[in-house]
Image (spheres, rainbow, N blue to C red):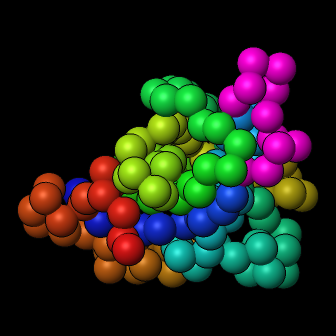
Amino acid sequence: MYRSLETYRGFVYPTSIDQVGHMNVASYTARFDEATWHFLAQLGLTPTFMRERGVAAVAVDQHTTYTREVLPGSLLHIRTELLALGRSSVRFMHHMFDSETDAEVATTELVGVYFDLTTRSAVQLPSVAHERAATLEVDDADDRAPAQSAR
């Protein structure tokens, strides 16, 4: 098991609202995407690291659950938990919270593959990713705390 990390903080502007009056799907996805970049950076897979090596992290599977409405003016934060790190893949879960109430408003589970941009195929994750992941390991499930903010 791995401890969670805060990977995003933001505010919901009126431009993120749909015709029903709550945050639109594209805005959830954009925030989860931003959190993904911060999470990958924690594993040593920064945009610069990947660009210099001609590799990328590509999403191959994603499942999102919307638990509560998010309204304009809401403060949000995301905590991310590594679920599994394979030879060339990473599986993780983002938990999005209303920062005022700490209520979970959405989750998304993703599987990404480390991908060579020249050969267009999966390649082995660098050792730094496994080393950084090892620093996130915990023995007690209570230490993961994905449902609590780190205020």
Rendered location of residue 145, percent (x, y)? 25, 59
- The quarter of the picture where the N terminus appears is bottom left
Q: Nearer the viewer, residue 22 or 117?
A: 22
Residue 3: quadrant of the picture: bottom left
What residue lies at 56% left-to-right and 30% top-to-bottom?
69
Regarding residue 117, the answer to whether it shows in the image is: yes
* Left or right relative to 143: residue 136: right
Prevailing SS of the magenta stretch? loop
Rendered location of residue 81, percent (x, y)? 40, 56
Residue 70: quadrant of the picture: top right
What residue lies at 75% left-to-right and 18% top-to-bottom?
20
Residue 14: in magenta span: yes
What residue lies at 62% left-to-right and 50% top-to-bottom?
74
Residue 118: in magenta span: no
* Position of 44 relative to 20 (above/below): below
What residue lies at 52% left-to-right and 73% top-to-bottom?
43
Which range of residues does the magenta coloring cover?
Answer: 12-22
Q: Nearer the viewer, residue 137 or 69?
A: 69
* Left or right relative to 128: residue 2: left
